[in-house]
Amino acid sequence: MTEPDRDPYLIASLRKGLEVIDCFAQRESWSLTELAAHLGLNKATAFRILHTLQESGYLAKDEDTGRFQLGMRFYSLGKTAMRHEQLKWQALPPLMNLAESTGETVYVGILYEGDAVCVQIVDGTELVRMHSFVGKRSPAHASALGKVLLAYMPDAEIDDYVATYGLKSFTANTITDPARLREELRQIRDQGYALDAEEMAIGLRCIGAPITDHTGRPFATVSLSAPSDRMTPERIATLVPQIKAAALDISRLLGSPGLHRRAAGAAV
């Protein structure tokens, strides 16, 4: 195994910062002197690390005592992590029911760094079915999982998404025009579900519907995928209510009061 100090990819300053953070699992608060002695750092180095973490919101300093403790940024991250873990397991029974009733592979996904990320999956029973895995990422604009979540974003956030990640083409059906994407997202909000019409891969079609959190805001998606030859318009019409029902079941398990049709600032 490569020694940490010899690892050419290791960022020494970041490693030291993480060692400082780890100290707060042992004790609720530390002074500069205590931390420097505990980690064998000189005070100037320890001060720069603590100051950087404080300015970033990861640590808070009591100005009366000079002691540091975990900041609100960690509580925010922890709350997000717990929400996603809760989503993963609360979604499982409705997903299992949906996979059993349809025979198709079903997923739950969230939006992360411009991608739709699968956090839970239940395989269908069809002999020919779509295979995926937890952690799989797909560009949001080319997937039903992602388009559902983009649809409920404010306009400014959609603009940021396009500017940051672009609208890369994967098939001839991928939406690559911002104006067309906006129109698609308006339609998704109006109908309450999204379709992936072979936009990510030829031969694959998907349907997605929003899962809402305790505030009623969409933050995740239930999606079903199947080979295109099984996703006729007639079958899609029968699947959409089932997928919406599964999304509603998961939302209720998470304490959602119901869907707020539009995020604040979204186009009408």
Image (tube, rainbow, N blue to C red):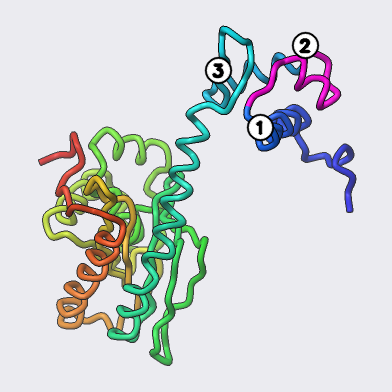
127 or 211, nearer to the observer: 211
Q: Along the polypeptide, which appears first: circle 1 or circle 2?
A: 1
Residue type of the residue flagged with mark 1: Phe
- For the residues marked 1 and 3, what is the alpha-carbon distance in whole angstroms? 17 Å
- At label 3, the amino acid type is Glu
Q: Residue at x 44, y 58 (%)?
A: 138
Dot label at residue 44: 2
Residue 15, x across and y down, in percent: 74, 33
Q: Amino acid at mark 2?
A: Ala
Q: Secondary structure at mark 3?
A: helix
Q: Residue furthest bottom?
A: 127
Q: Residues within 10 Å of mark 2 (few under 14, many from 20)?
A: few
Q: Nearer the viewer, residue 26 or 156?
A: 26
Report if residue 43 lies within the magenta region: yes
Q: Secondary structure at mark 1?
A: loop
Left or right of 213, for residue 128: right
The numbered mark, 3 or 2, whose residue comes first in the sequence reads 2
Q: Give the answer, above or below, for where 93 lies relative to 80.
A: below
Q: Which mark is residue 55?
A: 3
**Where is residue 77 drawn, in percent x and y?**
49, 39
Question: In this view of the protein, can residue 203 be seen by the observer?
Answer: no
Determine which quarter of the picture holds residue 59.
Answer: top right
Query: Which circle, 1 or 3, is nearer the viewer?
Result: 1
Q: Main secondary structure of the magenta part?
A: helix
The residue drawn where x is 57% and y is 28% is 70
- Find disc 1 in the rendering and name its residue: 24
Task: Report x, y in % for residue 50.
Answer: 66, 19
Residue pictured at 43% horizontal, 80% vertical: 123
State the CA–CA distance, disc 3 to disc 2.
16 Å
Q: As displayed, is residue 8 above or below residue 256? A: above
Q: Nearer the viewer, mark 1 or mark 2?
A: 1
The magenta region covers: 29-44
